[in-house]
Image (cartoon, rainbow, N blue to C red):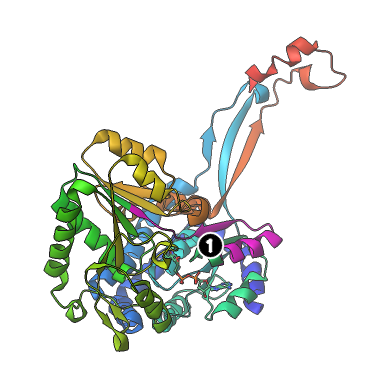
Amino acid sequence: MELHKQQQAFFSTQKTRNLSFRRDALKRLRNAIIEQEDAIADAIYADFKKPRFETFVAETQFVLAEINTMLKNLEFWAQSERVSGNLANFPSRNYIYREPLGQVLIIAPWNYPFQLTLTPMVGAIAAGNTVVAKPSELTPNTAAIVEKIIGKVFVAEHVAVVQGGVETSQELLSKRWDHIFFTGSPRIGKIIYESAAKHLTPVTLELGGKNPCIVDETANISLAAKRIIWGKALNLGQTCLAPDYLLVHHTVKDKLVQKLKDKIVEAYGEKQSQSADLARIINERHYNRLKSLLDDQRILYGGETVDEDNFIGLTLVDEPDLNNPLMQGEIFGPILPIFSYEKEPDIDAIVKRYEKPLAAYIFSNKRDSQKKFIAQHGFGGGVINDTVIHIANKNLPFGGVGHSGVGAYHGKTSFDVFSHKKAIVKRGRWIDPPLRYAPYKLPEKIAKWVKHLF
Ligand code: NAD
C-alpha cells in the first residue's frame, strides 16, 4: 500500500516530533470540526437517526474537548520527566523521554462513528505519530464526512482515512504498524490481536461485554430509574457502556419497574417510535437479531417494533432464563432484562457467569456495598449511583479488562498510549567505584547486599 510507505517516509522526516507542528495540526482539526459540526450531525442522522443533541454531546463536542485537553497540556506532557536516581547508578540524572511510536492504525466501529474514529486520532497526533483511520462501513455517511474533513486538514502522509469493510481491514492489518488502536467487538478484537502479534505490534483493544447494574434496597429508586433509562436509551442502547441487565433487591423490584416505566413515558412518550430523541438500530441484521431476543420473553413494558424503520422501543424483560440468547452475549440494544436478588451471593452467581465487562454500576447508599462492589468484581470502569457518565472525565483512563479490552485512553492516558517512554540515564564521570568491574573481588555476602543500592 502506497499510503503506508508514504507515511513511513513522512515520519522519518521527524516533522511530527515538533510540538508546534502537532499543535498546529490539532488546531486545524478543531476548526474544521467546529465548521462542519452541523454537517456531521446530518451525516450521523442519515446513518441511523441519532438525535442531534446526542451527536453534539457524545460525538463532536466530546472530540473537541479531547483536542482542547491535548492543546492545554501538550507541552507539559511531552517534556522529559526527571525521576530520582539511586546508589547503583550514582552519580547520574535519570529521565523518561516521551517519543512518538511512529505509524498508528485506527479501526473504528459504527455506534459512535465520529467520536470513536477521532478521539484516538487526536491522541495519536498529539503524541507525534502518523495515522491511518478506517471508519466503519456500516455508517457510510459519517465515514464520508470524516474522510472529507481529514482530507482537507491533513496531508495524507501525516493523517489519512481509508474506507472499506473487512477486506480493507485485512489489507491494512497485513502491514507493519507501530500501534494498532481497535474499537469493536471482542470477537474481532481477537483477530486484530493475532494480526498484530505477527509484527509484535502493540495494541489497544477497546471492546465490550455484559455490563451489570445493581440496585439495592437503600438506593434512591426514582433517581436510579431516571439514570438507568438515560444510560440505556442513549444511542438506543447501542453503547458499549450501556447497562446490559439489572440486578435489583427483591424488596424494591416492583417499585423500580414502575419508576422505569414512568421515566420511559416521561422522556419518550407512550409511543416511543414517535419520539425524536431515540436513534434507530443500525441495520436490519441487528434489528432482527434484537427482535428475536424478545421471543418468548415476559415483557414488563415496551416491546414496540417498527420493521421499516429498524426501531425497537425500550423494553423491560422480566427474569429471562440465563441460558436464553438474551443472556448469552452483549445485548447492544434497548432491551433491559431485570433480575431480582435476595442476598449478595445471588449477585455474584449471575455476574460471575460472564467475562469481565467494560463497565458496571451500583445504585446504593450503603458505603459497605459500594466498597464490596468495587473490590469484588472485575470490570473496566464504573459509576456508583449513575450510569455511563465516567466516560465524561478525561482524567480517568477509559478501557476494559480481560475480554472487554486491552489498554485504555482519553486525555493523558491517550498521550501516553501513543508515546514510547524512553528511559535515559545520564551518568556523571567524576567518580567510578571499581566494585562492579571484573575481576570480581567483593565477597558474596556483600554482593547479596547489593539490593539496597537499587
Ligand atoms: P465490529 O468488531 O464488528 O467492527 C469494528 C471494526 O472492525 C469495523 O471497522 C469493521 O469494519 C472491522 N472489522 C469487522 N470484521 C473484521 C475482520 N474480520 N477483520 C478485521 N476488521 C474487521 O464491531 P461493531 O459492530 O462495529 O461495534 C460494536 C462492538 O463494539 C460492541 O461489542 C461494543 O461493545 C464495542 N464497542 C466498544 C467500545 C469501547 O470503547 N470499548 C466503544 C464502542 C463499541
What is the three-letter code of the residue carrying label 1?
Answer: Phe
Q: Is the CB–ligand 1 distance for label 1 below 8 Å?
A: no
Q: Position of residue 26 (x, y in %)?
A: 42, 64
Q: Quadrant of the C terminus?
A: top right
Q: Position of residue 297 (x, y in %)?
A: 31, 69
Q: Position of residue 17 (x, y in %)?
A: 56, 57
Let me know if residue 103 appears in the view. no
Q: Is residue 109 above or below residue 343?
A: below
Camera-side residue of 245 and 410: 245
Left or right: 255 with respect to 69?
Answer: left
Reply yes or no: does residue 153 show up in magenta: no
Let me know if residue 110 appears in the view. yes
**Residue stretch rendered in magenta on the structure:** 188-212
Q: Is residue 453 above or below residue 417?
A: above
Reply yes or no: does residue 197 show up in magenta: yes
Residue 87 appears in which quarter of the rendering?
A: top right
Left or right: 266 with respect to 428?
Answer: left
Residue 302 appears in which quarter of the rendering?
A: bottom left
Q: Which residue is mark 1?
A: 181
Q: Residue at x 41, y 65 (%)?
A: 324
Q: Residue furthest right?
A: 439
Camera-side residue of 234 and 152: 234
Q: Residue furthest bottom?
A: 308
